């Protein structure tokens, strides 16, 4: 086996055995499953409870329920004998609104706009029918006049019926990517600082070249991160399918594949920078300050990636999906939602690969120069002659 492969295997095995790794994996899975379950509980569609009180209210309430079904709203109708009971039910939150004697609508405070609009429409229709009856029209004529269907809605751009579902999966993917990139990038930096502060690196570099040591560390930790991300993806997909959140598992599997692919691209880009951040300090306490620029870049990319789930075609999302530092957290969402052109994906992947290929030799030289120097070192000094 090559030297860097031995280093890589050592990093993978030792960190996988660490109790902190097992605890963090368990916590991540519990949080992710909790998010999926809670979102499934809360996202049960729109439902209103409507009380009908007095003469004429029942017909309006039934018309409201029928109209609501056309716009994917569930309205439950409850018959109440008197206005006092209805008022107490509204005030106690048992019902969202009450129709009293077919003449007025009773609500607790701010009226629910969607429910009130449905009630008003049904009431106007009912009163129109009564006016036509008084005018002498027969029931058949009135039904013919009022039996008008809703206007058809036509989209200029085709709408994927899975868009909302895939947006949820993309959100979870962005969340997982953010956690993995930050956590495993930090592991690279912290591992470098630990070896430097304990002077273990001096022993290692007596038999191993700096490039082999850095490469083995990045591949070992990256492989462990990829394995953990694969485990998290499997658990998340299994949970979503078990509670009926995913009706199109093939699309979800495609998202999981994209997340794993972009984790690899993003990790190798950031891991070299995290290694440099760790090599220029000798204490864990100083690591946070050197990591600040990388932390800001990842956090900013995370928020852009979250906003891209709602507006994947925005200029910000488009530009961020191409830039190497933000592409891993933004481009997967745009691909999943069908907003990324083929040339954009190709350009993003090419820039990420080329940037990483150009960055690794520079980071290796900086790492080799800094890792044996005591104290905190300025990067500007290390970059001279690179």
Image (cartoon, rainbow, N blue to C red):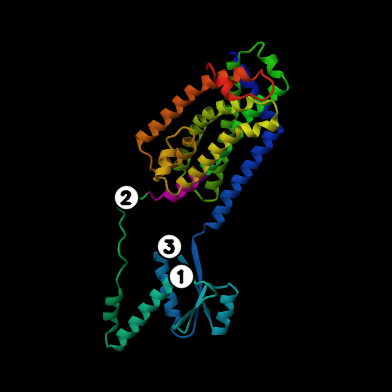
Which residue appears at 60% of the width and 20% of the height?
A: 367
Q: Main secondary structure of the magenta part?
A: helix
Secondary structure of the residue carrying tag 1 is helix
Query: Which comes sooner in the sequence, label 2 or label 3?
Result: 3
Residue 233 visible to the viewer: no
Query: Which comes sooner in the sequence, label 1 or label 2?
Result: 1
Residue closest to the far right: 198
Q: Which mark is residue 72?
A: 3
Closer to the eye: label 3 or 1: 1
**Residue 199 position (above or below residue 293):** above
Q: Nearer the viewer, residue 183 or 293?
A: 293
Q: Which mark is residue 233?
A: none
What is the C-alpha distance between the residues marked 1 and 2?
A: 29 Å
**Residue 207 position (above or below residue 195):** above
Tell me if 309 is positioned left or right of 40 in this view: left
Per the image, the residue denoted by label 2 is: 157
What is the C-alpha distance between the residues marked 3 and 1?
A: 12 Å
Q: Is residue 170 magenta?
A: yes
Which residues make up the magenta segment?
Answer: 160-171
* Labels 1 and 2 touching (C-beta < 8 A): no
10 Å neighbourhood of mark 1: few (<14), some, or many (≥20)? many
Per the image, the residue denoted by label 1 is: 115
**Residue 346 position (above or below residue 31):** above
10 Å neighbourhood of mark 2: few (<14), some, or many (≥20)? few
Which residue appears at 73% of the width and 22% of the height?
A: 198
Residue 314 % position (x, y): 40, 46
Secondary structure of the residue carrying tag 2 is loop
Tell me if 176 is positioned left or right of 64 in this view: right
Secondary structure of the residue carrying tag 3 is loop
């Amino acid at each position: 086996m090559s030297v860097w492969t031995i280093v890589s295997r050592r990093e993978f095995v030792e960190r996988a055995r660490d109790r902190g790794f097992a605890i963090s994996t368990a916590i991540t899975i519990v949080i992710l499953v909790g998010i999926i379950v809670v979102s499934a509980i809360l996202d049960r569609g729109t439902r209103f409870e409507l009380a009908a009180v007095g003469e004429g209210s029942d017909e309006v309430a039934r018309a409201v329920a029928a109209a609501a079904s056309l716009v994917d709203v569930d309205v439950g109708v409850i018959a109440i004998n008197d206005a006092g009971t209805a008022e107490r039910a509204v005030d106690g939150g048992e019902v969202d609104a009450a129709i009293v004697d077919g003449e007025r609508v009773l609500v607790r405070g701010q009226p629910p706009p969607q429910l009130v609009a449905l009630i008003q429409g049904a009431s106007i229709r009912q009163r129109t029918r009564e006016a036509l009856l008084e005018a002498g029209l027969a029931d058949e004529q009135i039904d013919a006049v009022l039996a008008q269907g809703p206007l058809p809605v036509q989209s200029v751009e085709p709408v994927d019926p899975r868009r909302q579902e895939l947006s949820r999966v993309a959100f979870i993917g962005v969340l997982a990517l953010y956690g993995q990139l930050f956590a495993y990038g930090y592991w690279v930096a912290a591992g470098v600082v630990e070896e430097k502060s304990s002077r273990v690196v001096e022993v290692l570099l007596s038999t191993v070249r700096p490039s082999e040591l850095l490469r083995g560390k990045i591949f070992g930790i990256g492989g462990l991160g990829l394995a953990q991300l694969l485990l998290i993806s499997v658990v998340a997909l299994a949970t979503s399918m078990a509670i009926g959140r995913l009706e199109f598992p093939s699309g979800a599997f495609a998202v999981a594949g994209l997340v794993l692919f972009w984790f690899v691209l993003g990790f190798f880009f950031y891991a070299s920078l995290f290694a440099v951040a760790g090599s220029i300090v000798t204490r864990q306490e100083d690591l946070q300050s050197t990591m600040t620029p990388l932390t800001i870049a990842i956090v900013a990319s995370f928020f852009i990636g979250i906003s891209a789930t709602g507006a994947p075609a925005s200029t910000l999302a488009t530009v961020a999906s191409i830039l190497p530092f933000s592409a891993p957290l933004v481009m997967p969402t745009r691909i999943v939602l069908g907003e990324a052109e083929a040339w954009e994906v190709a350009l993003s992947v090419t820039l990420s690969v080329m940037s990483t290929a150009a960055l690794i030799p520079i980071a290796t030289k900086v790492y080799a120069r800094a890792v044996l120097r005591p104290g905190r070192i300025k990067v500007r000094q290390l970059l001279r002659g690179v």
